[in-house]
Amino acid sequence: MKKTIAIQNGQHQHDDHVCMSRRRFLLTGGLALGVVALGGGLPGLVRAAGETVSAVQAGYQRQKIGSLSALKAGVPVDFAYPFADVSNILVKLGAQAGGGVGSDKDVVAFNQQCTHMGGPLQSTYKDQYQVLGPCPLHLTTFDLTHHGMVVSGHGTESLPQIMLELEGDDIYAVGVMGLLYGYADNTVGRSA
Ligand code: FES
């Protein structure tokens, strides 16, 4: 059946319904998306004028994890950070590393859960190559001299590096660079 479409002032009138023009639809859609984006990303902007909004900021704890004098080159030490169930290693590589502390910039710390599918990397440190791995599940290996970069295997994300600070002989963990496996936010807790 043939239907009649009348055009009035740039809008198509179809039976009893007014259809938007393509240009008008795109403009309206863009405005709606903009409001959604502002509402989700900048909540302060959609609150009433004059209302005070305080920012909530989560941070990492500063935690002593060892001492320089107790570390032996090539012998990793396990520690938990930033939560009791997050296993990491602290190791003196004997080679300068990105993020390394100490006079030789070779003391680093990394998480021990593979970024691919969460495989366990405990006891896989290879001092000869300063790598952690291969992961027992799909063989991903991480270079600890280059911020935990993947050097082989199925993984694509670098291993989270524990950020370190020195205070005299004491070594402190002060943050995590990279998202821990199974976490939506390193400072909040495991999501699954
Ligand atoms: S879980 Fe480690 S390589 Fe897949």
Image (cartoon, rainbow, N blue to C red):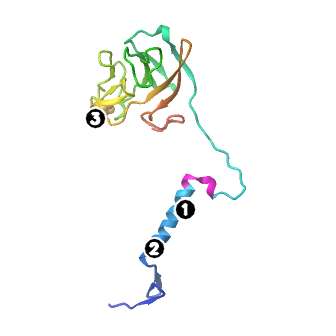
Kindly identify which residue carries mark 2.
Answer: 25
**Amino acid type, residue under disc 2 in the picture:** Phe
Residue 160 appears in which quarter of the rendering?
A: top left
Q: In this view, does 34 lie above or below 116?
A: below
Instruction: Give the image quarter of residue 62.
Output: top right
Tell us which disc is closer to us: 3 or 2: 2
Q: What residue is drawn where x is 63% and y is 53%?
A: 44
Of badges 1 and 3, nearer the viewer stands: 1
Q: Residue 80 carries which label?
A: none
The quarter of the rendered structure image containing the N terminus is bottom left
Q: Which amino acid does label 3 sit on?
A: His
Residue at 56% of width from left, 21% of height from top?
Answer: 63
Q: Is mark 3 on a helix, strand or loop?
A: loop
| Disc with the residue nearer the chain's start (1 vs 3) | 1
Rendered position, 1 above or below 57: below
The residue at 29%/15% (across/down) is: 128
Q: Does the magenta stretch include residue 42?
A: yes
Q: Which residue is drawn at 55% across and 62% down?
A: 35
**Part of the protein shown in magenta:** 40-45
* 51 sits to left or right of 39: right
Pointer 3 residue: 154
In front: 81, or 74? 74
* Mark 3 CB near ligand 1 (8 Å cut): yes
| Residue highlighted by disc 1 | 35
Number of disc labels? 3
